[in-house]
Amino acid sequence: MDYQVLALPNGIRLLFKPAQSAISHACLLVNAGSRDEDAEQPGMAHFIEHLLFKGTVKRNTNQILNRLEVVGADLNAYTTKEYTCLHASFLNQHTERSVELLHDITFFSTFDKEEIEKEKGVIIDEIASYEDQPEEAINDDFEALIFAGHPLANNVLGTRQSVAAFTRNHITDFIKAYYNTHEIIFAITGNYTFKYLSKIFEKYFAPIPENKSLKKRAPFVPNKPQKTILKKPINQVHCLLGNTAYSYHDDKKIGLLLLNNLLGGNGMSSRLNLEIREKHGIAYTIESNFSPLSDTGLFSIYFGTDVDKADKALHLTHKELKKLRETRLGNLQLKQAKQKFIGQIALGEENRLGVLLSMAKSLLDFNRIDSLAQVFDKIEKVSSNEILAIANEIFSEKRLSVLLYKP
């Protein structure tokens, strides 16, 4: 894979991937997310992500938002359980402008008291918006069920009560504790030389003081599976079932990613979609997902359907899982599953920002970046026996938790 890395004395690393394009993409990835929050402060990482856009030592909110938009560029951010990410897309000639802005909002935000109070209202409205979308809210409630008693159970958005109580000291304390400069990656892809980019990167990021704060992430111990039914003011039944799964350091991760794609991943030809939507016509959306984390992971299946069809949809879902537990994939089935998965990954290379984010995460988590050939080789090495063993471990009915939203 064609990329170069430069590490500054303060620990911040530059990741550069050249591209023959007039468009550049950049991201600043910090290894800090909702699982790092104190029990009394869920939502802090996400709150900080919002506040980074609300004023720096030399810019107010409007100047931040207009700095890139005035040249047609895009600036955005997101927060997950383990990461905070700022990202931008822009014409190559605006590279230094974009690098400087990402540097400014990350390290020189002022967290003005008035802006803090205004943003509390914005995020409380965001929480309400998610609660009005059962297909979104059920994911948060399922994670709270699966990871109960652990910081991973925290809703990334926090709660109305926690957000309302945030202060400037809470914000600066979190940044000091978790924005370790040795766990920050600035990644960029565009049509210029590494020498040119390194000069810009060093100009802005080299003067940043080193922060070697150490994380104290609590290890996760799986909970007992359970079934929960929640009554909601909705018209359909929404269902999530699943289980804790492999971390991204586990060698079995590749096998489960392949199996998940076969079962309910991208495309209309997944087993769950063919059986439940196409054959029986009882659910518009049915899909599965596997999200590996640093020390655990989450596998889940989601569907929404009418009240009178919910039991059948759940029965058919368990039936598909049972098939995978009891029947080894044939050579042709396994070959086709691999071809589909490899093809989807290859097509994903067209999403250059997505590829850059994936590379930055890999460098942060593994201190290396696998080439496509290496990724494909790992997929090709997965055997039908491994798939069967993974299915019996992860899809065991005794280990599956179920969350239902019912009208």
Image (tube, rainbow, N blue to C red):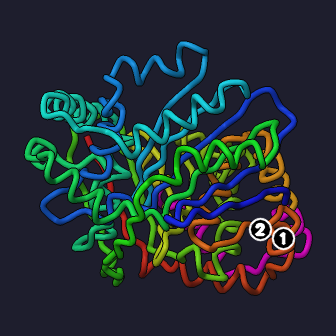
* Residue 324 x/y as whole percent: 67, 74
Residue under the image location 22 percent in, 53 percent down: 172
* Residue 276 x/y as whole percent: 60, 49
Residue under the image location 55 percent in, 84 percent down: 393
Element under disc 1: helix
Question: Which disc number belongs to residue 182?
Answer: none
Query: Is 187 within the magenta?
Result: no
Highlighted range, magenta:
314-338
Residue 145 seen in the figure: no
Quick one: 270 or 355, which is closer to the camera? 355
Count up the numbered dots.
Answer: 2
Element under disc 2: loop
Sort mark 2 into few (<14), some (14-19) or many (20+) by Cα contacts within 10 Å: few
Quick one: 361 or 137, which is closer to the camera? 361
Question: Which disc number belongs to residue 374?
Answer: 1
Sort mark 1 into few (<14), some (14-19) or many (20+) by Cα contacts within 10 Å: few
Q: Amino acid at mark 1?
A: Gln
- The residues tagged by marks 2 and 1 sit, at their Cα atoms, a distance apart of 6 Å
Question: Which disc number belongs to residue 370?
Answer: 2
Residue under the image location 42 percent in, 81 percent down: 398
Q: Are marks 2 and 1 in contact (CB under 8 Å)?
A: yes
Quick one: 84 or 127, which is closer to the camera? 84
* Residue 385 x/y as whole percent: 76, 86
Instruction: Decide if residue 371 is on the left or right side of residue 24.
Output: right
